[in-house]
Every structure is written in structure tokens, then in C-alpha cells.
Image (cartoon, rainbow, N blue to C red):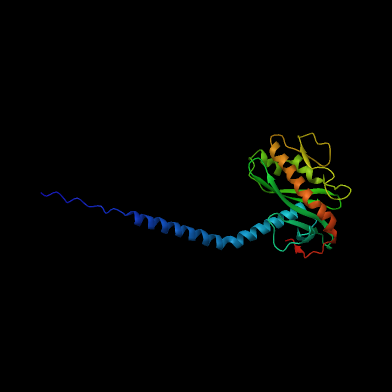
Amino acid sequence: MNAPAPIEQKRTSAWSMYRSIVGIGAFCALLIVTVFEATAERIADNKARFLSNAVAEVLPASRSTAEVTLDADGALVAAAEPADLPVFLGYGAEGELVGAVITAQGMGYADNIRILYAYSFERQAIVGFKVLESKETPGLGDKVEIEPHFLANFEALDARLNEDGTALANAIVTVKEGEKTEPWQLDGITGATITSDAIGAILHQGSSAWLPVLERDGRLFQPALSVEE
């Protein structure tokens, strides 16, 4: 009985493998782009809604807002398009100026921390605070978002300007938990020292940049209002 002839296996050429890999890669790239384009508008809308809700949370007295920026001369003007770190003026039901909301960011323990906080012109103080983005250590650094004594700092964190209105009268700084003695100090969190220190530094930097301009021009600004949902 004759043995069956061996089956010859056809070898795949390098060129065929290359074409297959390129084809799969091109298909995946096209799929990613298609999904991105299909969801970009929804993602942008969700981000805008989240930001609007955050603004309303830190400045609940506002019923409408106007995003502002600086022109080439450093004057306060209406923002032509949304900024990466937006700043808003907030207005009450009768159109009165009730405060400002500032977005700021800086390096924490693990990565950048992005925050949103409210400023009261009447009290010359920071009166609201929210973390927008953070990758801090769960159970430690993220305590800045939930720790009651830390959040109590923002009932009225002093942010008054010096006599000529060009800078903060006192630097906003974080001190060790239980050692706060001044209204411009943040009572820090034991076990989350780096993160709470970072919040103080971000607040100081953002306020130093924006509060002199907002105090100078904010009351004179003529807004095109965006009603909060």
C-alpha cells in the first residue's frame, strides 16, 4: 500500500503579511477616527454641561455667567471662544454681579490637579471650591475633595488685595492640619500634605493672576450672558 503523498504547505510571503498588517492597521485607524468624529460633539456637550454644573455648584447665587479673558493690553473682555482654563463672571437674578469663578491647575503628587473656585467681590474671599480633574492617590490625596475640615476653608478664604489693588495682600498658603491661624491660610490634611499644599499653590497662582483684573474691571464689564441650566 502506497503511503499518502506529503501535503505541501504554502508559505505566506513577507509581502502578504505586510499588506495584511497594514490593512488591519488602516482599518483600525479609520474606525478610531470614525468613532471620535461621531462622539466628539457629545463629549464636548457633556464637558460643557459638567463645567456649567460645577460653576453653579461653587457659586450658587449666579443665575447667568459670562466667560471673560484678557486682551493684548491686559483688559477684561468677553471670551471669543471657550478657554482651556476658563474664567467667568456670575450674575444674579436681577443682573447684579455676584462673583467670579476661576479655573486653575498645577502639579499635585501624581499629576496635574485642575480646580474650580468662586470669588466673592463683596467678601473679598474665595467662597467655593471643586476639584475638576485629579489623579491623586485614592484614600489620601483625594481627601481634598471630601474632607469636611478642608472644604470648610472655602466658606471664606481671605483673598483681599493690597492697597493699590495690584496683588494679593497675603499669600494663600497651606499649613499643617490644626495650625491655621489666619483667614488666608488653608488648614491642610494630614497624610495628604503634598496634595493640600498643591491646592494652596494653585489658588495663590490663579488668584494672583486674575483677582487684580477682576476687581479692577469686573464691575464695569458689560456681559453677554449665558443662562445656567
The answer to whether residue 20 is above or below residue 127 is below
Residue at the limit of the structure toward the front, as seen here: 73
In the rendered image, which quarter contains the C terminus? bottom right
Residue at the left extreme, as displayed:
1
In this image, 131 relative to 95: left or right? left
**Looking at the image, which residue is at 77% across and 45% down?**
204
Q: Is residue 146 visible?
A: no
Pinpoint residue 207: horizontal percent, then vertical percent.
Answer: 78, 49
Name above or below for residue 174 compared with residue 220.
above
Q: In front: 121, or 70?
A: 70
The image shows residue 124, relative to residue 37, as above or below, that is: above
- Counting from the top left corner in percent of width and height, residue 151 is at 75, 43
Q: In the rendering, at what x and y percent does residue 175 appear? A: 77, 36
Residue drawn at the location 72% of the way across and 39% of the way down: 197
From this viewpoint, is residue 210 visible?
A: yes
Taking 26 as reference, is 1 left or right? left
Residue pushed farthest right? 163
In this rendering, position of residue 111 left or right of residue 122: left
Q: What residue do we see at 34% from left, 54% from top?
A: 14
Count how many numbered circles sit on residues in the image: 0
Q: Position of residue 5 (x, y in %)?
A: 17, 51
Q: Which picture quadrant has residue 18?
A: bottom left
Left or right: residue 23 compared with residue 123: left
